Amino acid sequence: MRDPYDVLGVQKSANADDVKRAYRKLAKKLHPDANKNDPKAAQRFAELNSAYEILGEDDKRRAFDRGEIDAEGKPRFRGFEGFGHGHPGGGGAGREGAFESFTFGPEGFRRSGGGRSGFGGGGGFEDIIKDMFGGATRGARSGFGSAFEPEDFGAAPSRDIQASVTITLPEAASGTTKRVHLPSGKDVEVKIPVGLADGQQIRLRGQGLSGPGGAGDVLISVSIAAHPLFNRDGNDLRLELPVTLYEAVLGAKVRVPTLTGAVDLAIPAGSNSGRTFRLKGKGLKGKSGQGDLYATIRIALPEGGDPELEELMRRWQTQKPYNPRTDLD
């Protein structure tokens, strides 16, 4: 995945508001509903949501900036820093020695780099691991690529794997299937049920790491990306609906977007900004039933001003003054 700053088109110095504005602007432009003839629209929209998931959360953004997680939010393993630079008395390889990195997985610590190690003599890798974990490397082979038994690290009888996935609000409403890359290197297909709550976990039994007590589970945390139009309130959805001044004064039928397609809404004459209308059954499906959509109207004046409207308002102000704030005095 590309750098999330590049995906959102913002500088690293951008503040939280700048990031949010950039996301909302691109979300409206790239949303699959607005690009129904583009087969790659969903992919670009998913990439945008993944980028905002990192930059839109302070903790994740700081972790990414420090290099602790990658553009997909996965932890980066940096190996053991500070070794391989000529250890005194240890027969180290010196600065010219290539530093090797190691990963820990179902088979224990494994060497992932090539070339000379930079460890030597009595200061070998096994001794360092022994010092770090306070125990012998029982069952380990000499040299690099040593395998360690689970008991050496006080492992539980089985090991669970934690992972995360981000879905869109329409996907949460209808259900979907996602391919998730696990830290173990394995890819799994995950079925996301309809109406899953943000932050809820899905458990895949027996697909974790193996141990003496059997295989652990995979625990996948599901995040629902912010939507450019709708805000989620439990199973209900909330929407700000812009209307013109004449629609609010005279009444009108206006089109209202929903997750299943636009519908008509009758706005009564004399409706004020802030009035909320309920569209029954247009929310999300959940354990407690089908939610509703609440559309709150907001009167939007024409951009750039209008001399005739301004003149009308001046006459109105002179001939029919009124004060809507009398209850606030």
Image (cartoon, rainbow, N blue to C red):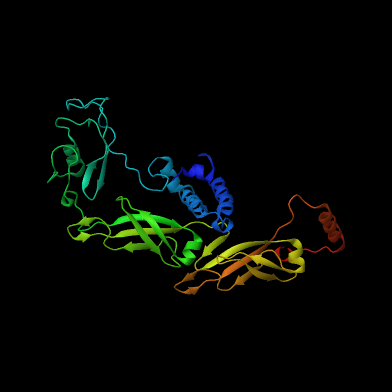
Q: Say which quadrant the N terminus sits in.
A: top left
Residue 287 to residue 221: above or below: below
Q: Nearer the viewer, residue 33 or 89?
A: 33
- Give the image location of residue 307, x and y in percent: 83, 52
Residue 288 to residue 167: above or below: below
Q: Nearer the viewer, residue 275 or 284?
A: 284
- Give the image location of residue 135, x and y in percent: 15, 45
Using the rendered view, name the quadrant where residue 36 is placed: bottom right
| Residue name at image x 61 percent, y 64 percent | 257
Q: Is residue 274 left or right of residue 26?
A: right
Using the rendered view, name the quadrant where residue 292 is placed: bottom right
| Residue name at image x 57 percent, y 68 percent | 293
Using the rendered view, name the quadrant where residue 213 is placed: bottom left
Q: Say which quadrant the C terminus sits in.
A: bottom right
Q: Nearer the viewer, residue 204 or 307?
A: 204
Q: Report the label total.
A: 0
- Give the image location of residue 322, x and y in percent: 80, 64
Q: Is residue 217 left or right of residue 148?
A: right
| Residue name at image x 58 percent, y 74 percent | 280
Q: Is residue 183 left or right of residue 317?
A: left
- Give the image location of residue 30, x and y in percent: 56, 52
